[in-house]
Image: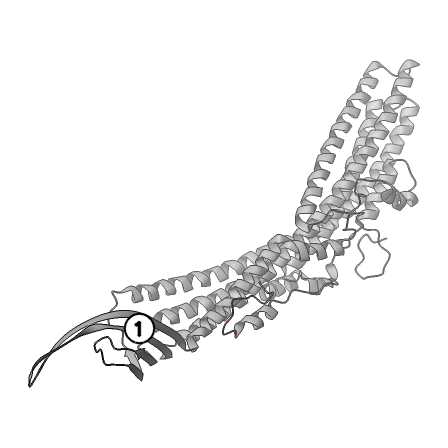
Amino acid sequence: MSLFPGRPGSVAVHVAAGVAVALALACGLRPAAASELLIARGPVLGAGLVTTLEVALIQAYQNNPQLNAQRAATRVIDENVAIALSGYRPRLSGTASLSENYLDNLSRTDTGSVRQSGSTTVTTFGLTSTQTLFNGFQTGNRTRQAEGQVFAARETLRSTEQSILLNAVTAYMNLLRDAAILELQRSNIRVLEATLRQTRDRFNVGEVTRTDVAQSESRLAAGRSSMLNAESNYITSRAAFRQVIGVDPGRLTAAMPVDRHSPRTLDGALARGRTEHPTITTAMYNVDVALLQVKIAEGALYPTLALQGNVQKSFGGPSSLTTVETFNASVGTQLTVPIYQGGAEYAAIRQAKETLAQRRLDLDTAREQVQATVVQAWGQLAAARAQIEATQAQVTATEIALNGVREEARVGQRTTLDVLNAQQDLVNARVSLVTAQRDRVVASYAVLAATGGLSPQILGLRIPVYDPMVHYQQVRDSWAGVRTPDGR
């Protein structure tokens, strides 16, 4: 019977079932009662909201603060496009002034001199408009650069989504594993306590020595220490679960690998990772952004042409007591040619070129990093598959060995220490099996993340997917307004 079937709907014995079988055998129950055991007992049965891995992924996708913070960061980058597009639009400014003036004017006439003196109030209102006609293509390059930053931010968001979903899977499977190991250790304590009682009874009738009793007591103390360590690991995993997923766990159920969503071969995984992984696509967009920054810096060497208009209305005259009102209107163009600005513009161009070279090297680094991650994840998945088969064989062999040692001990061919060692070997083997089954599931998700395919759409999560394009379209062509699309 396959532990992790490759197609939906087939009979499966996966993580929880394998754990339940181990628990049943450790307690001396028949394997058929294993599923009942996992439901009837165990520390994962607390009341909570999360019961399946799918629900855990949905909760993490909705509630994780790190992911929501990255979504907010993406919305911040969206505004860069609106800021860049403002360079195409006119600038309007209004002015108003109120002043009290005193005049004392002495003028010469044919009949003599005439003196005029007095105070006047001058009120002025004005409106100025400026429209940039040419600025060395800087506005267009800034707009394209802002759009490249938006694309890079979306890929960064996709990378964060993958990281959070993988962390959710890991936290879920860690809690499931640690709960099963804790129950295994508790079951082992019950077996060791029964062994100690039997050894003391045999000591009382003279069948064994005081050494055998001491060995049983020592092994029981070691078992209790292991149980306390398992309890500590369970508490830690539960806290990590709450941190990543955002809610407390309920009755956790088994999880299945997602091999069906990953490429069948390592070469296929590498090819998909090189084209779809967000780390690489982010680096590619960053190269485009850096290239446009070079063009923007070069645009500072071009002349600037602007159209200017001015309208001004004044009541009263600052230089004449007889002026009642004045109206002025003007329109014209202004050409500014940079000749030498101290060399700052040339340094900015050289700086932008060095940044472009750095971004290209970052792209090469990202490709190598993704390739190494894919190979590592693929190797871990293959090792997890093989480890399950090995640990299953180990559990079977140790069960047979334990039964044989117990029978031999009854006829005096084995010591109490032999029985205790065989029992501990069986517990260790079952713990290894539980760990291998956990690694199998996590490794399948790690391969999917390494190839850039760990997303709600591919996993088929029944949840509305966050679409960053919605906010982008809402703010891209906004000319005015301080409220965000959500009303803030």
Q: Is residue 485 left or right of residue 297?
A: right
- When the figure is inspected, residue 331 is found, relative to residue 11, above or below; the finding is below
The span picked out in magenta is 478-483
**Nearest to the observer: residue 338 or residue 318:** 318
Q: Nearer the viewer, residue 287 or 295?
A: 295
Task: Give whichever of 48, 417 is nearer the camera.
Answer: 48
From this viewpoint, is residue 263 visible?
A: no
Residue 117 in magenta stretch: no
Q: Residue at x 22, y 78 (%)?
A: 321
Q: Is residue 28 left or right of residue 134?
A: right
Q: Position of residue 204 (x, y in %)?
A: 91, 14
7 vs 117: above or below: above
In the rendered image, the vertical position of residue 350 relative to residue 60, given as above or below: below
Magenta segment's dominant SS is loop
Q: Say which residue appears at 89% left-offset and 23% top-offset.
A: 413
Q: Residue 95, position in %: x, y?
A: 35, 73
Q: Quadrant of residue 485?
A: bottom right
User: Which residue does the image show at 80% across and 43% down from the upper left?
Assistant: 46
User: Residue at the spot x=77%, y=50% of the render?
Assistant: 49
